[in-house]
Image (tube, helix red, strand yellow):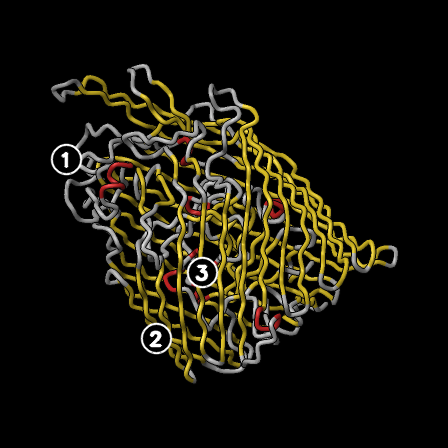
Amino acid sequence: MCKLVFCQSKLTYIDTLELQQIDVIDNKKNIFDFTFLKDVVNFQIYSGKKNELIIVDDNLSPVFNNTRQIYNQVVSLNIYYTDAAGLQLNIGGRGLDPRRTSNFNIRQNYYDISADPLGYPESYYTPPYESLNSIELIRGAASLQYGTQFGGFINFQMKKPVKSKKIQILSKNTIASNNMYSHFTSLSGVVNRLGYYIFYNKKKGDGFRLNTTFLSHNFYSFLSYNLNQKMKISFEFTYLDYLAQQPGGLTDEMFQFDIFQSNRERNWFQVNWLLYNFQFSYNIKEETSFLLNTFLLDAHREAVGFRTNRVDQIDSFEERDLLKANFDNIGFETRLIHRYNLFDKKAVFLIGNKIFYGNNSNEQGPGSDGFDPNFCFQYLNYPNYPNQSKYNNPNTNFSIFSENVFYLSNNMSLTPGIRFEYIKTSSEGYYRDINTNAAGDVILNEVINTDRKRTRSFFLVGLGYNFDLTESLSIYSNCSQNYRAITFSDINIVNPSFTINPNITDENGYTFDLGFRGHYNDFLIYDISSFLLFYNNRIGFIQKLISDGSIKNEKGNVGDAKIQGLESLLNFNLSKIFRFHMNGSLNYFINTSIITSKYINSQENGIEGNLVEFVPKINFKTGLKFKMNNFTTTLQYLYLSDQFTDATNSIDSDLSGVIGQIPAYDILDFNISYMIKNMKFEFGVNNVLDRYYFTNRATGYPGPGIIPSPNRNLNFSFELKF
């Protein structure tokens, strides 16, 4: 069995193997809730990479997927807080757009869960925190094993069947401000060779602004069966369905006047997500293991509402704009890992490949003129609706990747890696060019067909280094290339608030990390590092003068950017340091990032020398966590300095609210829990200081415009396990 054993605040790797399982043994009571991944875990190589492992604390679980609490010890993360329900994950970092975490490769139990990892890498589904065992993160060096993204890799490691019982039931109910309610129930156990883990999660509420009602259902099932001592199979099914009313965005003036207002009561958003996964593992021999991972996605998302470039414009109550997208994807990934000796030194070889095919479609046209969430097109009623388009977006991706850990000595290793990518994307469809005169009569109705095909193939390379100076101090370094293909949303549907540059191209660059990490006995766990990110052909927004005299925000390749920073995480076990005599622990963490950025080259006027978007210079998080017997409480503070949202570094906004500065903000959160036998009670206050702030100027739904973040809100939970 492959286990990660938490012992003396350090993970120890045990040489035998079992598929997709990380067991964190609570010898030190998980006093840090955070650690680092070892060189090799299951079929994954992490040696010489900037990585983090979030260990889920069942004693105190952030309700409604509170992102800033879950990822509070992950450095440099920039997070959108647009709703209090945690329906979507929106995290970026190091100058990457947080929107739907599109700059990370998002996986669940190591298989893709986003809409299309290359063509439309946005995440609409995020598993509830209560269902997780851990969360693994790797920064840009993940491009070689998992995909080409600049951000890296995030894997949600789901809970596995409880081996000691045939059935274990957990039920948790949460009530919160704004009529919010969440119910979570899970079943887990092992019967002979069959293991299972199943959960159902329901969320509903009104949100903190007008016109923000929502309802979601999430079901997940995992079944595993040991065919024999060497072979194992598992099957997973994930279902998510949610409907949310979209309150629309605000201009700066509207935000200053009243953050709770909304002039969009007819805007709705719906997601239906079906994920299937089948895995087969075979321990060919003690040194060699094979994994087959097959995944399939059948999903759609739909949005209907009144959208205009002027977000302060009152709804005309005419026909609404309707957008529908379908995602039908299938993928296969294989991995072979082999341990061997080279010149009397240990080595680990990994090779794998991925085959992915997606057949996705987008359609835009007239919706109904009603108030309800009607997602049916109304072409017969509104044949001259100006925004009409329909595209099929087939996408084929084939890749081969390999990495090898060469141990130069017992405490030093080099990890070179290479990845070959073949990407073929197509966009086949049409859009209508419809113009009317002042009287509303149609003077032009033209169908413009498009048939774009693009094929590219390339290699990415990287090299990692790790040196364990002592048992408690390691130096690591990595340099890996990155690549981001333009997405279908970059080129297909034009939002009224911006236009697309027809010459938009793929992005490329590389990431360099250098740091040292480790622990000092039970007193401290730390990771102090620097990074350098070169980002060529970066896609962003600039303001351009249109021929009719108006100014539009254009999305295209802005220029080449350089982003560099210092990152540090220090987590102190104060109870050990000051020798408090108590049956518990007191921890204090400091998470700091200081980042500078600049456009070093651009063909656009007024861009070179500007700061890069989504890069707050100071990203600071700190907090206390106190545990005693069955009592746990946390206090957490976050501060982010101001940041720009477009390459022209606009401070003042326009009528759309899409561009402009995001001012600095700070947030304080408090949580407390108490366990009595098999019952747990939790109470929390988010945004204790009741700050009015925003983190996102949305270009599309739920905007466009400023999307205010939640004000002070309270929650209470009761959990029963038996």
Q: Position of residue 468 (x, y in %)?
A: 75, 58
Q: Secondary structure at mark 2?
A: strand
- Taking the image as shown, residue 642 lies to the left or right of residue 291, namely left
Residue beneath disc 1: 316
Q: Position of residue 184 (x, y in %)?
A: 36, 69
Residue type of the residue flagged with mark 2: Phe
- Disc 3 vs disc 1: which is toward the camera? 3
Q: What residue appears at the point 57 percent right and 73 percent down from the top-left corner?
A: 575
Q: What residue appears at the point 34 percent right and 53 percent down from the top-left corner?
A: 272
Is 232 or 163 nearer to us in this picture? Answer: 163
Residue lying at the far bottom of the rendered structure: 677
Residue beneath disc 3: 636
Residue beneath disc 2: 718
- Assign the C terminus to one quadrant of the image: bottom left
> Pointer 3: residues within 10 angstroms few (<14), some, or many (20+)?
many
Q: What residue appears at the point 29 percent right and 65 percent down from the top-left corner?
A: 176
Q: Marks 2 and 1, how far apart in space?
A: 45 Å
- Taking the image as shown, residue 709 lies to the left or right of residue 595, namely left
Which comes before the other along the chain, label 3 or label 1? 1
The quadrant holding residue 679 is bottom left
Q: What residue appears at the point 76 percent right and 50 percent down from the top-left corner?
A: 414
Q: Marks 3 and 2, how far apart in space?
A: 22 Å
- Disc 3 vs disc 2: which is toward the camera? 3
> Pointer 2: residues within 10 angstroms few (<14), some, or many (20+)?
some
- Taking the image as shown, residue 464 lies to the left or right of residue 293, namely right
Which comes before the other along the chain, label 3 or label 2? 3
Above or below, comparing residue 452 to residue 639 in the picture: above
